[in-house]
Image (tube, grey):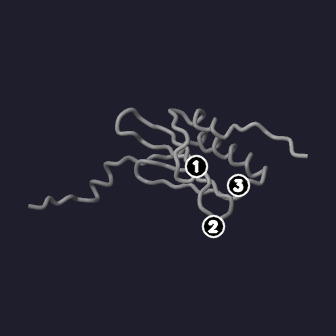
Amino acid sequence: MATLVDLGNYRRTRSQVSLQADELRALMNVYSRYVMRGEWKDYAIDFQPGYASFTMFKHTFDQPLFSVVKIRRRVGGLEWLVFNGKERVKRAQSLADALTYFDKKMELVQ
C-alpha cells in the first residue's frame, strides 16, 4: 500500500539557510581580491532548502571554479564547505576558518 505525502508540508519542514550580511561581506571581500588579480570575473548566489552557496567563475559561461557552501547539518547546527569544482577541499565550523583556504601568499611577478 502506498503512503501519500503532502509535498507542501514536507518542503516547509526543511528550513531555509541564508547568508547574513557579515558573511556576504566576507565572501565579497575574498571575491574582490581575486577580481583585482584577474582570476575571477563572475559569481552566483544560490539558496536551496538546507544550504546556501556562493560560487565563483573565471568567465560567465564557464564551469564553477570554487563554491563556498553553508549547510544545515542534521545535528549540530551549521557547517561551511569549500569546493574546487566538484572536489571538497575544506570543511569548517565558521566562515572565517573556511575562507582561510583562499589566503594565498602574494607572488611578485616581474
What amino acid type should be assigned to the residue bearing mark 3? Trp
Asked whether 64 or 14 is in front, the reply is: 64
Disc with the residue nearer the chain's start (2 vs 1): 2
Considering the numbered disc 3 on the image, is that residue within a helix, a strand or a loop? loop
The total of numbered circles placed on residues is: 3
Q: Which residue is mark 1?
A: 84
Q: Position of residue 46 (x, y in %)?
A: 52, 55
Q: CA–CA distance between discs 2 and 3?
A: 12 Å
Horizontal arrangement in the rendering, residue 109 relative to residue 18 (left or right): right
Label at residue 76: none
Q: Which residue is mark 3?
A: 40
Considering the numbered disc 1 on the image, is that residue within a helix, a strand or a loop? strand
Q: CA–CA distance between discs 3 and 1?
A: 13 Å
Considering the numbered disc 2 on the image, is that residue within a helix, a strand or a loop? loop
What amino acid type should be assigned to the residue bearing mark 1? Asn
Q: Position of residue 58 (x, y in %)?
A: 68, 58
